[in-house]
Amino acid sequence: MKKLAKFLSVFALSTMALAAQAQNVNNAQGYVQVYDVASKSNLPLNEYKQYHSENAIADISYMFWSFQGKLTVKVENLTEDTLYVNWSKSTFTIEGVEIPMTPEESKLTPEQYKIFEKYKAEAPVLTDMDYEWQKITMGREEKKDEVSKIISKSTYTKGNYYIMPRTKNTDAGIVLDTTVASYEEKHNSLKKEMATIYKADFTPENTPVTFTCKIVVSNDKDFKNATEVVETFYIASVREMDAKHFRGKRIGQDPDGYANYKFPERKSTSFYVEINPRNSVYFNKRFAR
C-alpha cells in the first residue's frame, strides 16, 4: 500500500508538472510583454541558466518564468549533513515592504498585509520530486516557524509570490511610450512575416520594479549559526510583441487535447504578462489621438 501511495504521489506530481508546461496565451490576437530580470550583484548563471548564489552549505537558485512572474527559489543542500531553511524568517521585499516568505497573516502590519494580498501567488510551487522533507517546528506557546529540513544532496523549491501585482488584465503590464525603440526579427509562427519588437531598457536607478529575496539557512536546527543569503533583482528591460510571435510554433498537444507551443522566449531569468491590446504601442501609435 505504501508503494502504491508513493507511486500515485509521483504520478500526480509528474502530471501537474507537465500541465504547467502546457502554456498558451489567452488572446492570440493580443500582445505580450516579456520582462528580463537582472541581478544587482551580477549573480552567475548555473548550468540551467538560472541565477544562483552558492556558499559552503547551500546553493540557492532563482527562477522567475511564469505569467506575472513568480519568485521561485530552489535551495540545494551541499553538505553531508542536514540543512534547515526557516521560511518564516526568510523574506520577500517589494515596493520597499518586507514580508515573510511564509507569513503568519494575523501578525502582519496593515502595510505588510496589503503587499501580501497584492503579490501572493494563487498556487504554491511544487517541491522537487527528488526531495524528502519534513516540517521541523520551533517554539512552544506562539505559532511555530515553518522550517524545512533538507537531507544531504537534496533540494527544496518554494514560490509564494508574484513579481508583478495581481491585477485585472486591463491593468496588467507597463504602458510603454510610443517613442520607445523598436526592431524587427523573423516571426516565430507566421511564415514570411517579420515581428516588430518594442523594447525599453532600465537601470537599477530607473527600473519600474525592484525586489529582494532573503533566505535564512542553517546546518543546525536551532539556527544558532544561521546564514542569511540576500539578493536583489530588478527589471532590466521590457520587450513588447504580438502574442503569436511570443508563443511560437505549435509543437503538439497535452493529454487533454490542448495545443502546446514552443515559447521561444521562455527562460528562468524572464517572465511575461499579457496586456490589454489598447495599451500596446502598436494600438497607441496607430489609433491614439
Image (cartoon, grey):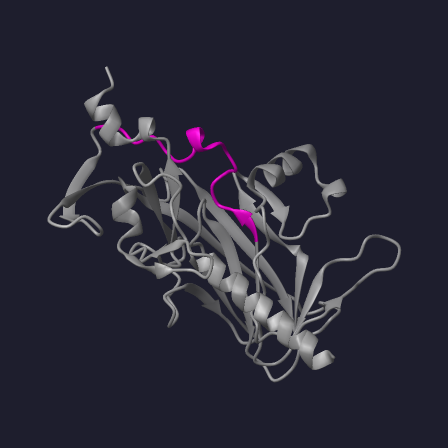
| Camera-nearest residue between 81 and 228 | 81
Task: Residue at 50%, 38% (x, y): give it.
Answer: 165
Residue farthest along the bottom direction in this orientation: 80
Task: Residue at 42%, 60% (x, y): give it.
Answer: 254
Residue 200 x %, y % = 27, 39
Residue 18 x %, y % = 47, 63
Residue stretch rendered in magenta on the structure: 160-178
Could you tell me what secondary structure mostly forms the magenta stretch?
loop
Relative horizontal placement of residue 288, taking residue 16 as reference (left or right):
left
Query: Where 41 falls versus 289 (above or below)?
Result: below
| Camera-nearest residue between 55 and 63 | 63
Relative horizontal placement of residue 276, taking residue 195 as reference (left or right):
right
| Camera-nearest residue between 39 and 30 | 30
Residue 266 x %, y % = 35, 56
Task: Residue at 46%, 61% (x, y): give it.
Answer: 255
Residue farthest along the right direction in this orientation: 141
Residue farthest along the top direction in this orientation: 289
